[in-house]
Amino acid sequence: MAAPMLMEALVRWQHAAGPFWPYVCAAPFLGAGDGELLARQTHDRIVRGTLSGPPGRQPGNRARRQRGLVSRLLCAESPALAPRPSLGEKEPRRGATQVGAMNCAPATSDPVGAQFIAPAGGGASSSILLVDLPAEPLLAAAPYLVERGWYVVPVVQRWIASPAVLPCRRLMERLMLGAWQARRPASPRGAVLIADGERMGPAGYPTVPGRAFDNRYEYQICRFPSTTFLMAQGVERVQWITSGTTAAERPVRRDLAPYLEDLLRTGLAVDVLSWPS
């Protein structure tokens, strides 16, 4: 049984994810011992004011960094700013995948409203942004994604333990703090699915030293929205941002390759964009 504090955080994230609530992974909120301890420590830091509070109370530099991160992510979703095909390639057709590099100009005069494009059909269609990057900075920026009209869905399945191969303290801080900041967007335009980009651990890390718990993992594609669900939400295109793939894994990490194939097989268009290291 998980601690009530952890369960409340999970429910808050699920409520904020709207129709995408089944895809908020429960694993980080189920650790009975270490997870509860880290959650209580995080709660105490929030109460004391030593952990970042709501967006309006964050230091200016941190808020600007988080807004900048959101603008870079969302420029991939904007048709006007998405990477163009390489020379000699055709425009991606329905059911095709386009592989490119992020090439987004930073927001200029209006970091909140810049690069905001309303969904086609007066809101009838939705967009999906699947972000396979380190989760903590994305979770910290969640309020600004909501501000721009996006459900935030942490598809993070990391088991919380200490000591562990994958560090947990910062992740738990972001999940606990974010649970009390999480809101549904006023005018939803789609969902940002935050995958755990560090789930496989450091490169060349075959063994576990000492007594560290090995909490590395790979995804099963059932952790992500099915193609039937996506089409019911009016999704026609998926923007997929990833980093750190090897030559053998490109364009996406190996555990998510079956999900990419499933999307394409159904006829959804997928743009796979490489995030700079």
Image (cartoon, grey):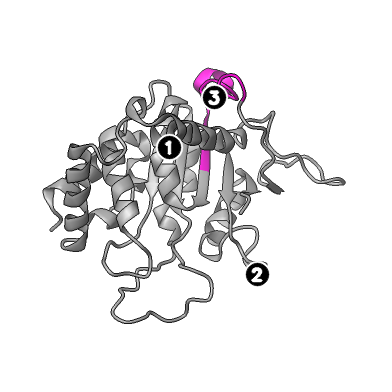
Q: Which of marks 3 and 1 is nearer the N terminus?
A: 3
Query: Is residue 112 rendered magenta in the image?
Result: yes
Q: In this view, does 202 lie to the left or right of 174?
A: right
Q: What residue type is labelled 1?
A: Ala
Q: Which amino acid does label 2 sit on?
A: Ala
Tell me which residue sits at (15%, 55%) in the image. 2
Residue 268 is situated, as x and y percent measured from the top left of the image, at 60, 43
- Contact? badges 2 and 1 (CB < 8 Å): no
Per the rendering, the mark at residue 26 is: none
Q: Mark 2 points at which residue?
A: 248
Label 3 and label 1: CA atoms lie apart by 13 Å
Q: What residue type is labelled 3?
A: Pro
Per the rendering, the mark at residue 111 is: 3
| Tag nearer the camera, 3 or 2 | 3
Q: Is residue 232 positioned above or below 6 on the image?
A: above
Label 3 and label 2: CA atoms lie apart by 37 Å
Magenta residues, start to end = 108-129
Per the rendering, the mark at residue 141 is: 1
Query: Is residue 22 rendered magenta in the image?
Result: no
Dominant SS in magenta: loop
Q: What element carries label 1?
A: loop
Q: Earlier in the sequence, mark 3 or mark 2?
A: 3
Residue 181 in view, yes or no: yes
Q: Is mark 2 on a helix, strand or loop?
A: loop
Residue 52 is situated, as x and y percent measured from the top left of the image, at 32, 38
In which quadrant is the C terminus drawn? Answer: bottom right
Quarter occupied by residue 212? bottom left
Residue neighbourhood size for the residue with mark 1, other residues' Cα within 10 Å, grouped as few (<14), some (14–19), many (≥20):
many
Residue 100 is situated, as x and y percent measured from the top left of the image, at 71, 48
